[in-house]
Image: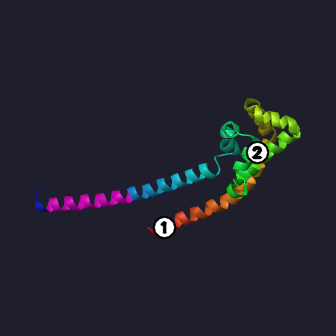
Amino acid sequence: MEPTQMILLVIAAAVAIWIFTKIAGAIFKVVLFAAFLLFGYIFFFGGSIEDVIEPGLEQMFKNNTMDELMAKHCDPEKLDALRCQCVIMPVYEDLQKRFNAEQLEELDKDQERMTEEVLRSFENKKEDMRVCAKDKQSGLIKIFNTFKSIFKGLMAEE
């Protein structure tokens, strides 16, 4: 090989590597942005209220009384607004409508029956929960859009 050909080959290789790194960097940014959006969607919205709440509902109510759940999710210091206002309170209100205080105390002692009744209350209040979650999510959407615009600004600076 002649020296001129070797120089052209090295220059072509350098240009190819430079182009590859630019393309790979752009692909990485797009993948990172897509992963961020996917994570944000799953974290904030979970697709729907059923996806966020229903699979873990039995686990959430298992081995917990309603008072314990309210203390855990509705305590002002540890307020989980979505779970408190959109899951715990509607279920609690439905249970109070269907049972008197004495029956509720018996339910608290029988976890298996409590879980059955809570799931029944969940079915009774599912539409109210969906509406509540949409109201709560509208505020989260604004926060998520703020994070999205900040992230886009950071990507544009590079």
User: Is residue 134 in sight in this rendering?
Assistant: yes
Q: Name the magenta segment's main secondary structure.
A: helix
Where in the figure is residue 99, as x and y percent of width and height? 87, 37
Relative horizontal placement of residue 97, taking residue 25 as reference (left or right): right
Asked which secondary structure carries label 2, the reply is helix
Where in the figure is residue 78, as x and y percent of width and height? 68, 55
- In the image, residue 31 above or below residue 58: below
- In the image, residue 3 above or below residue 92: below
Residue found 83% across the figure and 39% down from its top: 95
User: Is residue 133 in sight in this rendering?
Assistant: no
- Count neighbours of disc 2 (C-alpha within 10 A) and say few if under 14, some if 14 to 19, many if 20 or more: few
Tag 2 or tag 1, which sits nearer the N-term?
2
* Residue 52 among magenta residues: no
Q: Give the range drawn in magenta.
A: 4-23
How is the structure coloured here? rainbow
- Count neighbours of disc 1 (C-alpha within 10 A) and say few if under 14, some if 14 to 19, many if 20 or more: few
* Residue 9 among magenta residues: yes
Closer to the camera in the image, 34 or 94: 94
Q: Which amino acid does label 2 sit on?
A: Asp
Where in the figure is residue 66, as x and y percent of width and height? 76, 42
Residue found 48% across the figure and 64% down from its top: 155
The residue to which callout 1 is attached is 156
Residue found 11% across the figure and 61% down from its top: 3
Asked which secondary structure carries label 1, the reply is helix
Relative horizontal placement of residue 125, taking residue 11 as reference (left or right): right
Circle on res. 67 = 2
